[in-house]
Structure formats: structure tokens, C-alpha cells
Amino acid sequence: MAQRILLDLLGFTGERGGTETYVRQISRRLSATLPGAELIALTNAASVDLVRSFFPGEVHPIQWVRKDRATWAAGEIFAVNRYASRLGADVIWSPANFGPVSRRTPLVLTFHDVVYRDWRGNLVESAIRSLAWWMMRRSAHVAEIVITGSEAAAAELVEYAGVDPGRLRIVPHGTADPQPPADAWAELEPLGITAQRPIVLSTGNRLPHKNFTGLLEAIATLEPGQRPLTVIPGAHGEDPLKQDVERLGLEADVILPGWITYPQLEALYAVATLYVCPSLTEGFGLPVIDAMRRGCRVLANDVSVLREVGGDAANYADAGDPAALGRAVLAVVATPRDEERIAEGVAWASKFTWDASADATARILDEAIVAAGARG
């Protein structure tokens, strides 16, 4: 009988950046890496069509689960195991940090990072963070196997989430081939971006650990005539960084274009003088290798996970020190491109492929099924 593999995509919204890139890239390859397996996806009611656009199998919506975190959490706690039993699943793969919190159908959980451990905010935000962190740790406790993207993330999962090292598997993420548009500047014209000065690019959601405020403070330390044009896409709706831009007097130096199209992102990589990743922590740091794969110079925060991902071809600085980060940005922007080092970066980033990630994930799903069967 064919294996039945249930992908827990309740939290998929199309609006969550790198985690959802990971989901799309791996899941669309699973039918090739698991020939003969039957793939099933559980999704929220609002994202059915979006998931069907890339998922190579059956898609089952849970009608009462929407895009909000409250119904997503309730679905993980009360519905996923029940649907897995009803659909005859041999294993559940939860690829976005959260999964079922009880042990029924064998579970493989991808636990990307420990960001929720330190997420501070008002009373409501703190309560949401506390519930999320409990669910992540509980899912990891009941999982047959826990996947993460880097050695650094694995060490943090052991230290802060209490994950058993024997159940951890490290599967690096991949990067797709560049698809530069024929006319990058034409793609960027609607965003108000023109070829008048060097461009610093940084991308991501607006969670605190991304440290975009730190990047803006770094740009503000530079003399006005030295400042590159800094472009930070990734927000939905009103961008919370707008307040920082106004506070720091950077209206002429920063563009916040919101959520952009894939061709616009490729155009930004093509024209950027420098990609900056100021994140305080990451589970992997996908934009670092995406930028390097496209021949863009990279400056990353000097933390272990970004050194692991960026290797020797990236530049590093302390993103917790705005003055130091500002000096590093200026130094790279003012230095002519070293084509040999750029080529080294492209070669390094090209080693990370989604095909390899999908192959490793498929083997882990097989391993979980076998281990659960042997245990009875």
C-alpha cells in the first residue's frame, strides 16, 4: 500500500516570507522524491486556492481555520491528528514550527528557530508569544524527528527548547536559480527606484529579530551625502518601519515598498550594490544565499548561524552597534566589486539546492514511518 503523507499547512497564508518559500520549494518536489506516495495537505479555508497552485496532491481545507493565529493554534491542537487518522496518514509533516501537541500519528516537525522565546511586546502579544512557544516545544517533544536548517539552530533547539539531539536532523535550505528580468529598472520604476545612487537591499517580515530598526539607525549614522538608497520590502499594509524612517530623518534615503512581486525582487537583487542581513538571530538565513547566488555582495550580522550560511564570501559586522554597521555598509559600498570574490559567493551559494533539501526531507519522512512501525 502506498504511503500517505499529510502536510500540515494550516498556517500557510502566502504572507510569511522565508518559511513559506521553504514549504513551497520542498512540497512541490516531494512527489518526485517519494515516488508512489500519496500526498495530502491540510490547509486553512482562506488559503485553499493558493496551496492548490503549488501542492502536488490532495488539498483538504478545515473550514473553521482561517489565517489568524488563534484558529491556526486551535486547529493544530484539536484537528490535525483527527484528520490524519480519518485520511489514513502514515506520517504528518509540519513544516512551519507548529504541529500537533499530542502523540498519535507519527510526526515530523520542522522547527526553524527559537525566535518566539524572546519575542517581547504588550500583554496580548506576550500571551500569544507564550502560547506559540509552548506549542512549538510541545510539538517538538511529541515529534518522531525534528528537522532544522543549520548547526547553529540545532544547538539553540537543544539548549532552549530541550529537543533531544538524537531526534534532530539538519537539512540546509536551498536557493533557486536567478531569474533576472530583461529590464530591471523598468520593473522597479513603479516603486520609485532609479539608478541615481548605490542601493542597499534588505528583505523580510517585520518581526523584531529581523532588526530593521538597527539597519535604519546604522544608515542614519552616515553623513547625508554618503548614504546609499536603502530599500526594505516585505511589509503588508502600513509599514511599522515608517515611524523609524521619520524619527531618523531618512525620508530621502529609504524606500519601503511593501510586499513586492517576484520579478521586482529579482530586479532588486540585480541592481543592488549590497544586500544587508541585520538579523539578530535566524534559523538559517535564506536571503543571504539567495543574494549571493545572484552575484550580490552580502553584509550580515556577525552571528554563528549567518557565518555558517554565508561562509567566507560574505562580509560581517556587529548589527547590534549602529555605528559599526554603518561603517561596514559604507566600506563595502565604497569598495569596487571584486569579481573573483563574487564568483566564490555564487559557487558557495549554488551548493545549497532545494532538490537536496527535498531528498533529505523525503528520507526523514521514511525514517519516521519505519521508526514508528518498529515501535508498534
Image: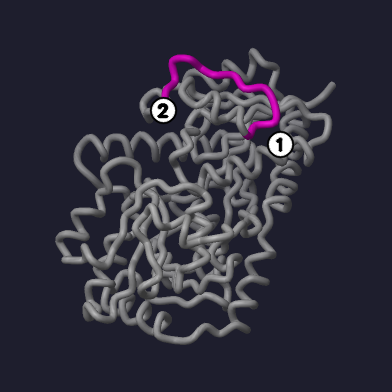
Which secondary structure lies at badge 1?
helix
Left/right of residue 250 with respect to residue 111 in the rendered view? left
Quadrant of the image containing the N terminus: top right
Kindly tell me whether residue 41 is visible in this rendering.
Answer: yes
Q: Which residue is mark 2?
A: 67
Q: How many C-alpha atoms fall within 10 Å of the one at disc 2: few (<14), some, or many (≥20)?
A: some
Left/right of residue 319 with respect to residue 135 in the rendered view? left
Quadrant of the image containing the C terminus: top right
Q: Label 2 amino acid? A: Lys
Colour basis: one colour
Labels 1, 2: front one: 2
> Where residue 109 sits in the image (x, y, percent)?
58, 39
Task: Report the residue at 46% width, 69% height from top.
Answer: 272
Q: Nearer the viewer, residue 16 or 137?
A: 16
Q: How many C-alpha atoms fall within 10 Å of the one at disc 1: few (<14), some, or many (≥20)?
A: many
Q: Is residue 66 magenta?
A: yes
Pick whichever of labels 1 and 2 is earlier in the sequence: 2
Q: Does 262 appear above or below 254?
A: above
**Is the stretch drawn in magenta largely helix, strand or loop?**
loop
> Where residue 290 sits in the image (x, y, percent)?
56, 61
Q: CA distance from mark 1 to mark 2?
A: 29 Å
Residue segment shown in magenta: 54-67
Task: Report the residue at 59% width, 36% height from top.
Answer: 143
Left/right of residue 356 with respect to residue 77 in the rendered view? right
Q: Which residue is mark 1?
A: 368
Which secondary structure lies at badge 2?
loop
> Where residue 75 sits in the image (x, y, percent)?
47, 22
Task: Report the residue at 48% width, 37% height from top.
Answer: 14
Q: Is residue 137 magenta?
A: no
